[in-house]
Image: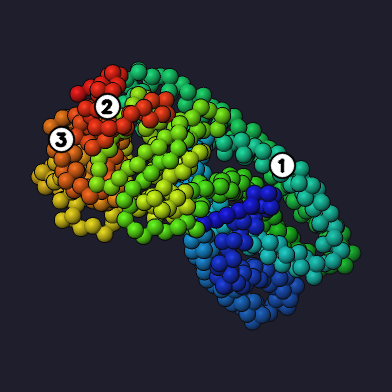
Amino acid sequence: MLKINRNNYRGRLHYFFFKKYVARYLKTLFIIFFLLLLTSVCSLASPYALKIIIDQAFPHKDHILLIKVLLFLVSIYVVRLVTMYATEYYFALMGNRIVKEIRLDIFNHLLLVPPIFFEENKVGELVHKISNEVDRVEYILTNGVTRYVTNILTVAGLIVMLYILNKQLFFVSIVLFPLIIYTTIYFTPILRRQYKKASKREAGINHFFTERLSNVKFIRLFNAMRHESDKLNSMLTGLINVNLNTVKTSSVNRNLSLFFIALGPVTVFGFGGWQVFSDQATLGTIVAFLQYLNRLYAPSTDLINFHNDLIKAKVSMQQLVEILNTPVDENFDAARSGIAMKERIDKISFKDVSFRYTGLDPVIDRISFDFETGKKYAIVGPSGAGKSTLVNLICKLLQPCQGIMMVNDTFNLKTLNQIEWLENICIVPQEPQMYTDSIRENVRYGSYTKTDRDILHVLEKVGFSEFVTSHPQGLDFEIDNKGFRLSFGQMQRIALARAILRNPQVLILDEATSALDTESEQFILGNIFKLFKDKLVIIISHRITTIVDVDEILYLKDGKLISAGNHESVVSNRDKYTSLFRA
């Protein structure tokens, strides 16, 4: 996993992307550098060959020399063709692998950041960064760097040849270059700010599409199509305005530089013409010099364009680095050094446990209770009572602010290996999570070694095997992340089957059967209670039929454990208890 020190890294974005990743391909880089050097040398041959033809072959009518020079040029062009092909291939290979590694590092890092990160950052904007911003970096790492290195080598070679051909003319022709450099330096910070602003607006639009297209039904029900269209129109208009301002600045920067570059040949004609008239230079020398100077125009222009692309890439790099600088969840960060508990879970004990979010009242207030393996528990209470927080504490997704949680009266839950602990626990939420894949892959998510026979067995336990076996595609029947072509109840069955297949030591059902009818619910819960009779089952529900057969019911209110016992005892002690349920 990537760990970057933000304070030491600011302003050194190239160090991160180029040194860390590109350094793994040093051998390939040396090959590419050699090919680029060979390509640049080949590109310098033709103007000098033209000088030889004009000054030697034509005046002396030397056909043999002319043929030799032309054959030499053809061989040079063939070599250049091969070297350019090989260079582009190796750069594309290296660049795509580097981008793959960057995306993997970002994705793996995002899996471990605290949950609050996703509350503070829009998912659509994160997707934009992982996709579009990385694409800009990819362009710089492949085509961009190829262009940059090739142009630098070409410009260097051209300058050497110009100096060799005519020193006086060389110094006259470069007098305008300080103006080009100043123009670039002046516009760079302006362009960087504008690219950053445009990137932020693009991310916002990407999030808009992600959010709205996931809720088309909701938009239609509220007849908000016109409102959403107007909102998108406003966002797109804002992006256009930002892009136009960027284009104006970029165009002024580029065209001013090109204007100064274009004045070069004018200077050469003026001073070079005087040298020819005074017999200080030959016509072939001036023609060759102009050829080299004209060839300097294209790579110089490309370097200026590359500089604009590089500013965009720097903005993209900065946004990616900000993601990678986000500290990982302390629970997972400590998991690497946590204690690996190999023994079976027999008991989870809460001892005077409290939890509160910063600056808020306690969500869990001094709760003491023992969850024992082999028993079935229900956690009930009004909304905001602390039921989900209690479950998150059991899963180590949150840490107590006060008190201690023990496992088997031996291990402090806080010190256990987080990853191994979650291997023993499975939660089935009210909103079943589906992925765009087959029923098979959705059921065996997290249990990848299970066979089709195992999958059909658990589907039978949740009353869904008949649907699968009667469908022509069977387990290959594909659904999307919204459970397309499935009812909400069918999605809950798949989620329950996934949990049974995982066979955890602790099973938590958080309103997991809310969309099922009473008969189906009782059938599934009956099978779960049989399969998990020697394990710990915890149920959160607002339906009395769901929890009536559990061993103990925990009644929470305002974060406090008001009472605990079987259904009859809780009913007899709490008048408000029955008002929580609707059969």
Mark 3 or 2 closer to N-term?
Answer: 3
Which residue: 62% across, 39% down? 196
Amino acid type at circle 2 is: Val
Is label 3 in a helix, a strand or a loop?
A: helix
Give the residue number, with chain letter if any, for mark 3: 522
Is any part of residue 218 visible from this angle? yes
Q: Is residue 569 left or right of residue 97?
A: left
| Residue 13 at x, y percent in the picture | 64, 52
Give the amino acid type for the residue marked by disc 3 in the picture: Gln
Q: Are marks 3 and 2 in contact (CB under 8 Å)?
A: no
Q: Secondary structure at mark 2?
A: helix
Identify the mark nearer the N-term, 1 or 3: 1
Categorize mark 2 by other alpha carbons within 10 Å: few (<14), some (14-19), many (20+).
some
Q: Would you name the residue on which mark 2 appears? A: 570
Looking at the image, which is closer to me, 283 or 244?
A: 244
Q: Which residue is mark 1?
A: 189
Q: Nearer the viewer, mark 2 or mark 1?
A: 2
Asked if residue 522 is positioned above or below residue 28 in the image, the reply reads: above
Instruction: Report the side of 490 relative to 436 (left or right).
Output: left
- Compared across the picture, whether 171 is left or right of 327 comes to right
C-alpha gap between disc 1 and disc 3: 66 Å
